[in-house]
């Protein structure tokens, strides 16, 4: 049955948030789920950043190489699990696996003293966190695109993102305020507890969706928002299906290119960050505190944007123009950093770029997947989110190292990103246009099928 068209929200709360009364519980659980995911990550993110600087700026390219290698190993395993288990089971197992990993690192960081062994534990921790970050967030958004319709996603993804932003603020605050009192190893235990909270939210969401589906709810209420599959259905397919589907689809390739160019720019900025921070601050505690404060500022700005601007921007400008905002910020930011590669300019650009990514680019990019079949939401999306994203890291980090070896300074390195950001803007605008075409086709197909069935009954 075709779901009824969405009406405008009537209550004050609905007008403020964009959520209908019948969507309230799903949105709240989704936001809480995202809260636990990002708070778990942001507790340990500053620890990773400090380990990267402490291990030597010159070793950062090799850390990204190790991360890409890990992605190559992890994606087929995850895709195979997705093919054989129900959604609830494979997502739960994924999070519990990372919780066990955190406990292992708790032991390692507690018993390994300073020295060569400590450096290598730090390097493996950097690689592991880089995999963990993308994986848990990718799985979360795959789940969201699976339970919400395309029109719902434009209204609600920004609102759901508020939960993640608050989680980021809480996670950053835990590390910023407790790093002087607790060891890095002890802080990992906070992440373990927070991930268990995410698992509980996932199970509650899946049960809610199943209940709504059994009661006759349509897409966005427990069934695949684009294909009508029940939430408990096994997705099937092969371990390499996601890769094949990306290579066969210009649209998925475009999403991959969008992510690739974003990541290349982020990696250049990350390396410039390491250089500027290491020159500006002398001690490990100062650097860790600065990283945590930047994270906190990013999340506060993101929260404000998500609460008051994200939904309205998507409504007023549409997916196409909303997707182009971050490339424009990047063009202007790299030009400014090229003119003045100093700490103040870097901080402003970094905060604006990361906040623009979390508040606008991420929810808008996830809307792109709502018009695709379920297999693309978990397998093709996972390949783009993990391998393509980290391939961008590789291209960026080794390009940065090569250009620096040629004698380019931070100013020139920043300016090399301006034309890439311009190409990124072109791809963003094309993706937005293509998404609109696919969304229109998804909305009209059920009506065409219903009209065709009615015509056959009349003829009979």
Image (cartoon, rainbow, N blue to C red):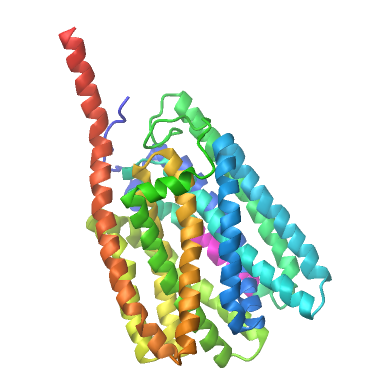
Q: Residue at x 77, y 79 (%)?
A: 116
Q: Nearer the viewer, residue 181 or 379?
A: 379
Q: Residue at x 33, y 56 (%)?
A: 254
| Residue 459 against residue 102 in the figure, above or below | above
Q: Main secondary structure of the magenta part?
A: helix
| Residue 246 against residue 408 in the figure, above or below | above
Q: Nearer the viewer, residue 152 or 266?
A: 266
Q: Find out whether residue 302 is within the magenta segment.
A: no
Q: Position of residue 460 (x, y in %)?
A: 19, 7
| Residue 395 against residue 369 in the figure, above or below | below
| Residue 168 against residue 8 in the figure, above or below | below
Q: Position of residue 448 (x, y in %)?
A: 21, 27
Q: Position of residue 98 (x, y in %)?
A: 66, 54
Q: Find out whether residue 165 is within the magenta segment.
A: yes
Q: Residue at x 71, y 57 (%)?
A: 101
Over which residues does the magenta segment extend?
Answer: 164-176
Q: Nearer the viewer, residue 173 or 56?
A: 56
């Amino acid at each position: 049955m075709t779901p009824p068209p969405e009406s405008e929200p009537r209550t004050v709360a609905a007008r403020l948030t964009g959520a209908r009364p019948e969507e309230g519980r799903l949105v709240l659980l989704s936001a809480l789920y995202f809260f636990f995911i990002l708070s778990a990550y942001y507790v340990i993110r500053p620890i990773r950043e400090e380990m990267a600087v402490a291990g030597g700026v010159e070793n950062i390219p090799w850390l990204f190489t190790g991360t890409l290698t890990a992605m190559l190993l992890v994606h087929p395993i995850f895709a195979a699990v997705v093919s054989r288990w129900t959604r609830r089971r494979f997502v739960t197992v994924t999070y519990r696996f990372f919780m066990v990993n955190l406990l292992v690192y708790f032991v390692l960081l507690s018993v390994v003293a300073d020295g060569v062994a400590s450096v290598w534990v730090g390097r493996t921790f950097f690689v592991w966190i880089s995999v963990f970050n993308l994986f848990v967030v990718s799985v979360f958004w795959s789940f969201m695109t699976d339970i919400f319709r395309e029109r719902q996603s434009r209204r609600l993804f920004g609102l759901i993102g508020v939960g993640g932003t608050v989680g980021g603020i809480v996670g950053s605050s835990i590390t910023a305020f407790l790093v002087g009192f607790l060891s890095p190893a002890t802080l990992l235990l906070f992440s373990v507890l927070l991930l268990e909270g995410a698992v509980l939210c996932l199970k509650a969401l899946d049960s809610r969706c199943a209940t709504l589906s059994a009661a006759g709810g349509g897409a966005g209420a427990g069934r695949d928002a684009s294909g009508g599959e029940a939430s408990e259905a096994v997705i099937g397919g092969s371990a390499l299906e996601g890769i094949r589907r990306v290579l066969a689809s210009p649209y998925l390739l475009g999403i991959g290119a969008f992510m690739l160019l974003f990541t290349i720019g982020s990696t250049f900025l990350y390396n410039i960050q390491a250089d500027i921070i290491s020159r500006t601050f002398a001690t490990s505690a100062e650097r860790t505190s600065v990283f945590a404060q930047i994270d906190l500022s990013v999340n506060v700005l993101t929260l404000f944007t998500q609460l008051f601007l994200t939904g309205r921007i998507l409504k007023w400008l549409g997916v196409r123009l909303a997707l182009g905002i971050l490339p424009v910020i990047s063009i202007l930011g790299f030009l400014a950093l090229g003119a003045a590669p100093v700490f103040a300019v870097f901080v402003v650009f970094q905060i604006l770029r990361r906040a623009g990514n979390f508040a606008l680019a991420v929810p808008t990019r996830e809307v792109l997947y709502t018009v695709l079949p379920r297999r693309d939401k978990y397998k093709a999306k996972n390949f783009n989110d993990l391998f393509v994203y980290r391939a961008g890291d590789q291209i960026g980090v080794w390009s940065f190292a090569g250009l620096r070896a040629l004698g380019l300074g931070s100013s020139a390195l920043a300016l090399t990103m301006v034309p890439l950001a311009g190409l990124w803007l072109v791809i963003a605008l094309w993706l937005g246009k293509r998404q609109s075409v696919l969304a229109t086709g998804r909305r009209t197909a059920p009506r065409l099928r219903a009209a065709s069935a009615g015509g056959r009954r009349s003829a009979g």
